[in-house]
Image (tube, rainbow, N blue to C red):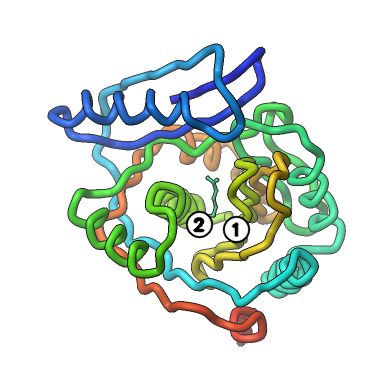
Amino acid sequence: MRASRKGEHISGAEGIFERSVINDAVRAYVDRAYSHSRGLPDRVVITIEELKVRPVFLKSLPVYTVDIKTNDEAWEFIKRFLFSVGVSMRAFENALFVVQSGIVMRGASIMTFKTGRRLEPDTARGVRATRLGITQEAEETLFSVIDSYKLNRTVVSEAIVLATKVAAFKDVIAELCVSDDPDYTTGYVSSKRTGYLRVPNIKEEGEKKGGRVIFVSEDADINGLIHYLENTPVVIDSIGEFKGIVSPDEAIPVFNN
Ligand code: PML
Protein backbone atom coordinates (compact mmCIF):
# COMPACT_ATOMS: atom_id res chain seq x y z
CA MET A 1 0.00 0.00 0.00
CA ARG A 2 1.24 3.48 -0.89
CA ALA A 3 -0.56 6.60 0.27
CA SER A 4 0.38 10.09 -0.87
CA ARG A 5 -0.97 13.62 -1.02
CA LYS A 6 -0.09 16.02 -3.84
CA GLY A 7 2.66 13.59 -4.75
CA GLU A 8 4.19 13.61 -1.26
CA HIS A 9 4.62 10.29 0.50
CA ILE A 10 2.32 9.82 3.51
CA SER A 11 2.60 6.16 4.35
CA GLY A 12 3.37 2.75 2.93
CA ALA A 13 3.18 -0.83 4.11
CA GLU A 14 3.54 -4.32 2.69
CA GLY A 15 3.18 -7.94 3.65
CA ILE A 16 3.16 -11.51 2.38
CA PHE A 17 -0.15 -13.30 2.86
CA GLU A 18 -1.95 -16.53 2.08
CA ARG A 19 -4.61 -16.08 -0.59
CA SER A 20 -7.35 -16.76 1.99
CA VAL A 21 -6.58 -13.63 4.06
CA ILE A 22 -5.96 -11.14 1.25
CA ASN A 23 -9.39 -9.48 1.53
CA ASP A 24 -8.87 -8.79 5.23
CA ALA A 25 -5.32 -7.60 4.63
CA VAL A 26 -6.44 -5.13 1.94
CA ARG A 27 -9.18 -3.75 4.20
CA ALA A 28 -6.64 -3.23 6.99
CA TYR A 29 -4.24 -1.43 4.60
CA VAL A 30 -7.03 0.88 3.40
CA ASP A 31 -7.90 1.71 7.02
CA ARG A 32 -4.25 2.46 7.71
CA ALA A 33 -3.90 4.66 4.64
CA TYR A 34 -6.77 6.86 5.85
CA SER A 35 -5.76 7.08 9.49
CA HIS A 36 -2.12 8.07 9.37
CA SER A 37 -0.94 10.92 11.55
CA ARG A 38 0.84 12.50 8.56
CA GLY A 39 -2.59 13.35 7.17
CA LEU A 40 -5.22 12.26 4.66
CA PRO A 41 -3.97 10.95 1.31
CA ASP A 42 -5.49 11.97 -2.04
CA ARG A 43 -4.10 8.84 -3.69
CA VAL A 44 -3.88 5.29 -2.34
CA VAL A 45 -2.39 2.52 -4.44
CA ILE A 46 -2.79 -1.10 -3.44
CA THR A 47 -0.83 -3.64 -5.46
CA ILE A 48 -1.28 -7.39 -5.11
CA GLU A 49 1.25 -9.68 -6.72
CA GLU A 50 1.65 -13.43 -6.65
CA LEU A 51 5.07 -14.59 -5.41
CA LYS A 52 6.91 -16.38 -8.18
CA VAL A 53 9.73 -17.68 -6.03
CA ARG A 54 9.85 -19.39 -2.67
CA PRO A 55 10.59 -16.94 0.16
CA VAL A 56 13.78 -16.96 2.18
CA PHE A 57 12.88 -17.80 5.80
CA LEU A 58 14.70 -15.91 8.57
CA LYS A 59 14.70 -15.64 12.36
CA SER A 60 14.06 -12.08 13.49
CA LEU A 61 16.91 -10.06 15.01
CA PRO A 62 17.20 -9.99 18.81
CA VAL A 63 15.64 -6.83 20.21
CA TYR A 64 16.99 -4.45 22.88
CA THR A 65 15.58 -1.16 24.09
CA VAL A 66 18.32 1.30 24.98
CA ASP A 67 17.73 3.30 28.14
CA ILE A 68 17.64 6.77 26.62
CA LYS A 69 15.84 9.69 28.25
CA THR A 70 16.55 12.68 25.99
CA ASN A 71 17.05 13.52 22.32
CA ASP A 72 20.69 14.49 22.99
CA GLU A 73 21.35 11.13 24.65
CA ALA A 74 19.70 9.37 21.69
CA TRP A 75 22.02 10.96 19.13
CA GLU A 76 25.09 10.56 21.30
CA PHE A 77 24.26 6.86 21.52
CA ILE A 78 23.56 6.52 17.78
CA LYS A 79 26.87 8.16 16.94
CA ARG A 80 28.78 5.85 19.31
CA PHE A 81 26.94 2.82 17.97
CA LEU A 82 27.58 3.68 14.32
CA PHE A 83 31.24 4.47 14.97
CA SER A 84 31.60 1.13 16.77
CA VAL A 85 30.46 -0.77 13.66
CA GLY A 86 32.89 1.22 11.49
CA VAL A 87 30.76 4.09 10.15
CA SER A 88 32.90 7.20 9.58
CA MET A 89 32.14 10.75 10.79
CA ARG A 90 31.48 11.78 7.20
CA ALA A 91 28.97 8.97 6.60
CA PHE A 92 27.33 9.74 9.95
CA GLU A 93 26.92 13.43 9.02
CA ASN A 94 25.54 12.55 5.59
CA ALA A 95 23.08 10.17 7.23
CA LEU A 96 22.04 12.89 9.65
CA PHE A 97 21.22 15.08 6.67
CA VAL A 98 19.01 12.33 5.18
CA VAL A 99 16.93 11.83 8.33
CA GLN A 100 16.75 15.50 9.32
CA SER A 101 16.40 17.32 5.99
CA GLY A 102 12.61 17.13 5.91
CA ILE A 103 12.61 15.47 2.46
CA VAL A 104 10.47 12.44 3.20
CA MET A 105 11.50 9.53 1.00
CA ARG A 106 9.37 6.46 0.28
CA GLY A 107 12.39 4.26 0.77
CA ALA A 108 15.83 4.22 2.29
CA SER A 109 19.05 5.93 1.37
CA ILE A 110 21.89 3.49 0.74
CA MET A 111 25.20 4.92 1.90
CA THR A 112 28.78 3.69 1.84
CA PHE A 113 29.93 3.45 5.46
CA LYS A 114 33.34 5.14 5.05
CA THR A 115 33.05 7.67 2.23
CA GLY A 116 29.37 8.45 2.89
CA ARG A 117 28.39 8.20 -0.80
CA ARG A 118 24.72 7.80 -1.57
CA LEU A 119 24.22 4.84 -3.90
CA GLU A 120 20.44 4.84 -4.35
CA PRO A 121 19.66 5.72 -7.99
CA ASP A 122 16.84 8.12 -7.07
CA THR A 123 17.75 10.20 -4.00
CA ALA A 124 14.24 11.66 -3.72
CA ARG A 125 12.58 8.23 -3.61
CA GLY A 126 15.18 5.95 -2.05
CA VAL A 127 14.94 2.17 -2.16
CA ARG A 128 12.03 0.54 -0.44
CA ALA A 129 12.29 -2.94 1.05
CA THR A 130 9.19 -4.84 -0.04
CA ARG A 131 8.16 -8.50 -0.23
CA LEU A 132 8.52 -9.12 3.45
CA GLY A 133 6.25 -10.93 5.81
CA ILE A 134 5.90 -13.09 8.87
CA THR A 135 4.23 -16.45 9.41
CA GLN A 136 1.04 -16.43 11.45
CA GLU A 137 2.66 -18.47 14.21
CA ALA A 138 5.73 -16.21 14.44
CA GLU A 139 3.48 -13.14 14.38
CA GLU A 140 1.44 -14.45 17.33
CA THR A 141 4.65 -14.99 19.31
CA LEU A 142 5.98 -11.56 18.36
CA PHE A 143 2.68 -9.82 19.20
CA SER A 144 2.53 -11.44 22.62
CA VAL A 145 6.07 -10.25 23.46
CA ILE A 146 5.34 -6.77 22.10
CA ASP A 147 2.11 -6.66 24.15
CA SER A 148 4.03 -7.63 27.27
CA TYR A 149 6.19 -4.50 26.79
CA LYS A 150 3.05 -2.43 26.01
CA LEU A 151 4.38 -1.36 22.60
CA ASN A 152 2.60 -0.68 19.32
CA ARG A 153 2.11 -4.09 17.66
CA THR A 154 1.98 -2.95 14.05
CA VAL A 155 4.80 -0.40 14.13
CA VAL A 156 7.24 -2.50 16.13
CA SER A 157 6.60 -5.84 14.40
CA GLU A 158 6.85 -4.35 10.91
CA ALA A 159 10.04 -2.50 11.81
CA ILE A 160 11.64 -5.69 13.18
CA VAL A 161 10.66 -7.67 10.08
CA LEU A 162 12.08 -4.99 7.79
CA ALA A 163 15.30 -4.56 9.79
CA THR A 164 15.81 -8.33 9.76
CA LYS A 165 15.48 -8.47 5.98
CA VAL A 166 17.84 -5.51 5.50
CA ALA A 167 20.49 -6.83 7.93
CA ALA A 168 20.62 -10.23 6.23
CA PHE A 169 22.20 -8.92 3.00
CA LYS A 170 25.94 -9.63 2.95
CA ASP A 171 27.14 -6.06 2.26
CA VAL A 172 24.94 -4.31 4.83
CA ILE A 173 26.90 -2.89 7.78
CA ALA A 174 24.03 -1.28 9.75
CA GLU A 175 20.73 0.53 9.41
CA LEU A 176 19.44 3.73 11.03
CA CYS A 177 15.72 4.48 11.14
CA VAL A 178 13.88 7.58 12.32
CA SER A 179 10.13 7.23 11.89
CA ASP A 180 8.49 9.91 9.74
CA ASP A 181 5.33 9.52 11.82
CA PRO A 182 5.09 12.71 13.94
CA ASP A 183 3.57 10.74 16.84
CA TYR A 184 6.29 8.09 16.95
CA THR A 185 9.49 9.14 18.70
CA THR A 186 11.32 5.80 18.98
CA GLY A 187 13.69 4.80 16.20
CA TYR A 188 16.31 2.10 15.87
CA VAL A 189 19.79 1.15 14.79
CA SER A 190 20.40 -2.42 13.74
CA SER A 191 22.85 -4.86 12.21
CA LYS A 192 23.19 -8.60 11.89
CA ARG A 193 25.92 -8.71 14.54
CA THR A 194 24.29 -6.46 17.13
CA GLY A 195 20.58 -7.07 16.65
CA TYR A 196 17.82 -4.46 16.67
CA LEU A 197 18.38 -1.64 19.17
CA ARG A 198 15.35 0.52 19.88
CA VAL A 199 16.26 4.17 20.54
CA PRO A 200 13.61 6.19 22.41
CA ASN A 201 13.52 10.00 22.01
CA ILE A 202 15.21 9.85 18.61
CA LYS A 203 13.09 12.89 17.75
CA GLU A 204 10.76 15.37 19.40
CA GLU A 205 7.01 14.73 19.50
CA GLY A 206 5.23 16.27 16.48
CA GLU A 207 8.34 16.24 14.25
CA LYS A 208 7.50 15.04 10.73
CA LYS A 209 11.08 14.58 9.56
CA GLY A 210 12.43 11.06 9.36
CA GLY A 211 14.01 8.48 7.13
CA ARG A 212 16.14 5.37 6.83
CA VAL A 213 19.78 4.96 5.97
CA ILE A 214 21.30 1.60 5.10
CA PHE A 215 25.09 1.70 5.52
CA VAL A 216 26.93 -0.64 3.17
CA SER A 217 30.53 -1.64 2.50
CA GLU A 218 32.51 0.51 0.04
CA ASP A 219 32.45 -2.22 -2.62
CA ALA A 220 28.81 -3.21 -2.03
CA ASP A 221 26.95 -4.99 -4.79
CA ILE A 222 24.42 -2.17 -5.13
CA ASN A 223 22.38 -3.77 -7.92
CA GLY A 224 22.26 -7.03 -5.97
CA LEU A 225 21.16 -5.17 -2.82
CA ILE A 226 18.42 -3.21 -4.61
CA HIS A 227 17.19 -6.39 -6.26
CA TYR A 228 17.20 -8.19 -2.90
CA LEU A 229 15.36 -5.38 -1.07
CA GLU A 230 12.73 -4.92 -3.77
CA ASN A 231 12.26 -8.43 -5.09
CA THR A 232 13.45 -11.25 -2.86
CA PRO A 233 10.59 -12.43 -0.67
CA VAL A 234 11.63 -12.80 2.96
CA VAL A 235 9.41 -14.29 5.63
CA ILE A 236 10.17 -14.33 9.35
CA ASP A 237 9.33 -17.78 10.70
CA SER A 238 10.85 -17.59 14.19
CA ILE A 239 11.41 -14.83 16.71
CA GLY A 240 14.74 -13.77 18.21
CA GLU A 241 15.00 -12.93 21.87
CA PHE A 242 13.60 -9.72 23.38
CA LYS A 243 16.31 -8.67 25.80
CA GLY A 244 14.52 -5.81 27.55
CA ILE A 245 16.08 -2.49 28.57
CA VAL A 246 19.86 -2.09 28.39
CA SER A 247 22.09 0.90 29.18
CA PRO A 248 23.83 2.67 26.27
CA ASP A 249 27.16 1.21 27.44
CA GLU A 250 25.76 -2.33 27.38
CA ALA A 251 24.30 -1.77 23.91
CA ILE A 252 27.55 -0.62 22.26
CA PRO A 253 29.07 -3.67 20.62
CA VAL A 254 32.64 -4.73 21.32
CA PHE A 255 34.04 -6.79 18.49
CA ASN A 256 37.15 -8.87 18.89
CA ASN A 257 38.04 -9.00 15.22
C1 PML B 1 8.16 3.36 11.42
O1 PML B 1 7.52 4.36 11.74
O2 PML B 1 7.74 2.56 10.58
C2 PML B 1 9.48 3.05 12.02
C3 PML B 1 9.41 2.73 13.47
C4 PML B 1 10.75 2.32 14.02
C5 PML B 1 10.81 1.96 15.48
C6 PML B 1 9.88 0.87 15.92
C7 PML B 1 10.14 0.45 17.38
O3 PML B 1 9.54 1.06 18.28
O4 PML B 1 10.91 -0.47 17.63
Q: Respond yes or no on whether mark 2 lies under 8 Å from ligand 1.
A: no
What mark, if any, has residue 56 been given in the picture?
A: none
Residue at the spot of label 1: 186
For the question of whether residue 205 can be seen, the reply is yes
The picture places residue 30, in percent across and down from the top left corner, at 38, 23
Q: In which quarter of the image is the C terminus?
A: bottom right
Badge count:
2
Q: What residue type is labelled 2?
A: Ala
| Separation of residues labelled 1 and 2 (CA atoms) | 19 Å
Can the viewer see residue 257?
no
Residue at numbered disc 2 = 167
Image quarter in which the N terminus is found: top left
List x then y, in percent, for residue 241. 36, 73
At numbered mark 1, what does the secondary structure look like: helix, strand or loop? Answer: loop
Residue drawn at the location 54% of the way across and 30% of the way down: 11
Q: Which of marks 1 and 2 is in front?
A: 1
Pointer 1 local density, CA inside 10 Å: few below 14, some 14–19, many at least 20? many
Task: From the viewer's perspective, tell me whether residue 97 is left or right of residue 190.
Answer: right
Q: Quadrant of residue 27?
A: top left
Mark 1 and mark 2 lie on one chain; the one further toward the N terminus is 2
For the residues labelled 1 and 2, say whether their Cβ atoms are less than 8 Å apart: no
Frontmost residue, 184 versus 119: 184
In the image, the residue with mark 1 has its CB under 8 Å from the nearest atom of ligand 1: yes
Q: Tell which of 40 and 190 is nearer to you.
A: 40
